[in-house]
């Protein structure tokens, strides 16, 4: 069975927040083997929404997801998030120096000297 989810009807034309995307999980029918995400008229998608959308689709191993009516905004965000998810994350080590200032004047002098 194929299920179609039209984002502008379910949410709006602007897709914000990870928590909003999480609501999508409850909308996907158990008996659907193919789920179409219809992005017609979507004008904005946040990075967090796109990332959570990937989390949701990854959690359904038995379903095929199809993305339709994606404009440049949606395609760009989905591509950026996908590339970021596939890139190895490297966190550098740093030993930040903690400075203490006795008053605003000494802080100002320090900042001016930079």
Image: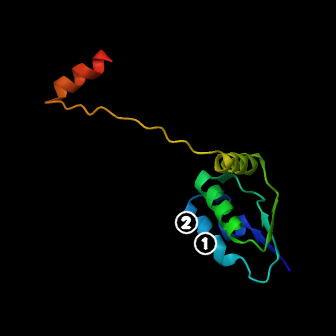
The one of 107 and 13 positioned closer to us in this rendering: 107
Viewed as shown, does residue 67 lie left or right of 73?
Answer: right
Residue 56 placed where, x, y %? 66, 67
In 3D space, how far apart are the residues under numbered discs 1 and 2 (Cα atoms)? Answer: 7 Å
Q: How is the image coloured?
A: rainbow
Residue situated furthest left in the rendering? 102
Which residue is disc 2 drawn over?
A: 19
> What is the quadrant of residue 38 in the picture?
bottom right
Location of the C terminus (image quadrant): top left
**Residue 9 seen in this snapshot:** yes
Which residue is disc 1 drawn over?
A: 23
Residue at the spot 74% in from the left edge and 82% down from the top edge: 30
Residue 103 placed where, x, y %? 14, 30
**Discs 1, 2 touching: Cβ within 8 Å:** yes
The one of 21 and 15 positioned closer to us in this rendering: 21
Residue at the spot 35% in from the left edge and 35% down from the top edge: 95
Residue at the spot 82% in from the left edge and 76% down from the top edge: 33
Residue at the spot 79% in from the left edge and 54% down from the top edge: 70
Element at label 2: helix
The one of 27 and 71 positioned closer to us in this rendering: 27
Q: Is residue 21 above or below residue 80?
A: below
**Dot 2: within a 10 Å radius of its alpha carbon, few (fewer than 14), some, or many (20 or more) residues?**
few
């Amino acid at each position: 069975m194929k299920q179609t989810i039209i984002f502008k009807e379910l949410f709006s034309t602007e897709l914000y927040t990870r928590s909003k995307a999480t609501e999508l999980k409850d909308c996907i029918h158990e008996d659907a083997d193919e789920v179409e995400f219809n992005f017609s008229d979507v004008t904005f998608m946040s990075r967090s929404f796109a990332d959570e959308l990937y989390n949701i689709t990854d959690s359904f191993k038995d379903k095929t997801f199809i993305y339709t009516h994606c404009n440049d905004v949606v395609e760009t965000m989905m591509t950026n998030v996908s590339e970021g998810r596939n890139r190895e994350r490297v966190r550098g080590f740093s030993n930040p120096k903690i400075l203490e200032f006795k008053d605003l004047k000494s802080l100002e002098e320090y900042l001016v000297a930079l």
